[in-house]
Image: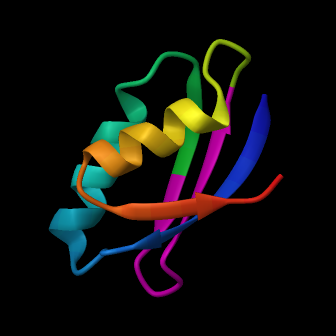
Amino acid sequence: MQSLIFKITGLKDETSVRALANAIQDLPSIGHVEISLEKGEASVEHGRFVSPDDILQAIIDAGFEAEYSL
């Protein structure tokens, strides 16, 4: 599995953290997801059946702004 860090804009509280986690975990081939409200980051382990852009799109579709770097 690969691991990526996404910088997330728009996390306000634990409810938004749960919404984001659910959006990411709905994707195929997602391993561990850890979201830090304080840092505004999401650490996502993913397999080869989902691309970083797929994860980014799921975050955007959930109502957040995000970016990542490889």
Front-lying residue, 8 or 30: 8
Image spot of residue 33 (x, y percent): 53, 47
Q: Which residues are magenta?
A: 34-46
Report the front residue among 47 and 7: 7
* Picture coordinates of residue 15, whole percent (x, y): 16, 65
In this image, 16 relative to 51: left or right? Answer: left
The residue lying at 25 percent from left, 55 percent from top is: 18
Query: Which quarter of the picture shows residue 5?
Result: bottom right
For image coordinates 28% across by 43% down, the residue present is: 61
Q: Main secondary structure of the magenta part?
A: strand
For image coordinates 39% across by 48% down, the residue present is 59
Q: Quadrant of the N terminus?
A: top right
Identify the residue at horizontal 65%, vertical 27% (top origin). 51
Q: Nearer the viewer, residue 34 or 65?
A: 65
Residue 15 sits above or below residue 56 on the image: below
Colour scheme in use: rainbow
Residue 66: x, y in percent? 49, 62
Q: Position of residue 64 (x, y in %)?
A: 32, 61
Query: How many numbered marks are there?
Result: 0
Task: Decide if residue 46 is on the left or right side of residue 66.
Answer: right
Using the image, determine if residue 39 lies above or below residue 35.
below
Residue 6 falls in image quadrant: bottom right
> Is residue 55 on the magenta stretch?
no
Is 50 on the left or on the right of 69, as rendered?
A: left
Return the residue found at the far bottom: 38
Q: Is residue 8 above or below residue 21?
A: below
